[in-house]
Image: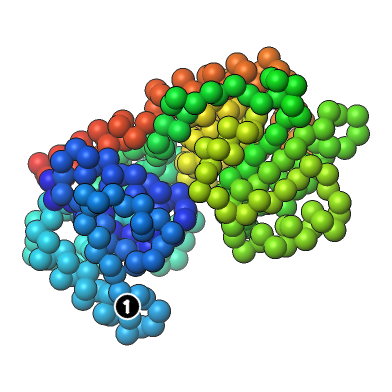
Amino acid sequence: MRVLLVTDSLDVGGLERVVVTLAQELAGRGHEVTVAAEPGGALWHELPDGVTRAPAPPRRTARDHVRYARWLGRLVRRGRFDVVHAHQRGVALRARLLRTGLPTPVVEHVHNVFPAHGPMRLLSFRGDHLVACGGAVADMLVTDFGRPAGRITTVPNAVPDRGAGRDLTLPSSGGLRPTVLAVGRVSAQKDPHRFVDVVAALNAGDRPRVDAVWVGEGELLDECRARVAGEGIPGLTFAGPSDDVAGWMERADLVLLTSRWEGLPLVLLEAAAMGRPAVAPDVGSCAEAVVPGRNGVLFDVDAAPAVIADLVAGVLQPDELGRMGEEGRRLYLERYTLDGQADRIEEVYRRVLAR
């Protein structure tokens, strides 16, 4: 098939990583894949050689948006694509309007949960077929946005198998101090200040001490670093951005997510692939990636830091850590491999083309 994947940019982020890995998998299966995005993002260079790059014009002004619409319309019409696979609401709506008169179906990939109010409820998720990254996202599309269940397919996110061929022994099993890891943008959505509070609670009182690291960049990075230094919180580091997430996980014992909202976070799938238990909020589709008692625990999204710290301390018990890590690895192989994701996406394409 000739497939056009369209997204805003390829900056660092979960959505963008899904686009890159999906492009790689589809191209590896013999499909002719084109990725349209504004050039220059950190992941732009990660697109494999077998994928065609379509650099999109910038959208800074109203005139830019008109120019972009014309550019996208020409691309869709001249490319003779079998499927247009859009990864944002605005892009999907434009693609569907611009393909008027063409048989090309627009598959719209939904990567997160969104509030359903105002004009956006009417304009959002109008692709010919919707791909939800998790069960909670699919439920949102039906319940909150009124989209027909028959036009929705749940295709869970997936990540490369970074654990293959690695020694997945937990560092603390060798007598080292346990390390708690967070990976993601240092932003309001991820609530890094709650992460700081949890680490402070873990290292208070008579509890055994832990080390903690947050890997990622974002608008709150300097603020969080200043807070850690100012309050003298022991054992906590905001390391900044890194391309070696698997390396950081290899040096950690547990992954902690403190987000306020999510779709199906890739970091939880990466933790499972690396045999690391996870503690996460019960939001979005986190409960699909973290099965309580199997490979981690969940907490209420409004739980106090002290409550979360108690849950983390419970998982950090040696017997629980090892068992949950092994279960996470099994869960990854069952549900979240790239090969499995590509199989499901190909089936979506076949369905929309047959219809």
In this picture, is 53 found above or below 56? above
**Residue in the foreground of this view, choosing between 12 and 305:** 12
Q: How many marks?
A: 1
In this picture, is 116 found above or below 282? below
Determine whether the residue tagged by mark 1 lies in a helix, strand or loop.
Answer: helix
- The C terminus sits in image quarter: top left
Image coordinates of residue 94 in percent, x first then y, are 26, 67
- Label 1 CA crowd tier, 10 Å (few <14, some 14–19, many 20+): some
In this picture, is 198 found above or below 98? above
* Corner quadrant of residue 36: bottom left
- 193 relative position to 166: left or right: right
Residue 142 seen from this side:
no
Q: Which residue is mark 1?
A: 65
Residue appearing at x 37%, y 31% in the figure? 337
Residue 82 seen from this side:
yes
Image coordinates of residue 140 in percent, x first then y, are 43, 46
Scheme of image coloration: rainbow
Under mark 1, the amino acid is His
Image coordinates of residue 320 in percent, x first then y, are 66, 18
Residue appearing at x 85%, y 58% in the figure? 230
- 187 relative position to 172: left or right: left
Residue appearing at x 83%, y 48% in the figure? 233
* Corner quadrant of residue 119: bottom left
Image coordinates of residue 38 in percent, x first then y, are 34, 67
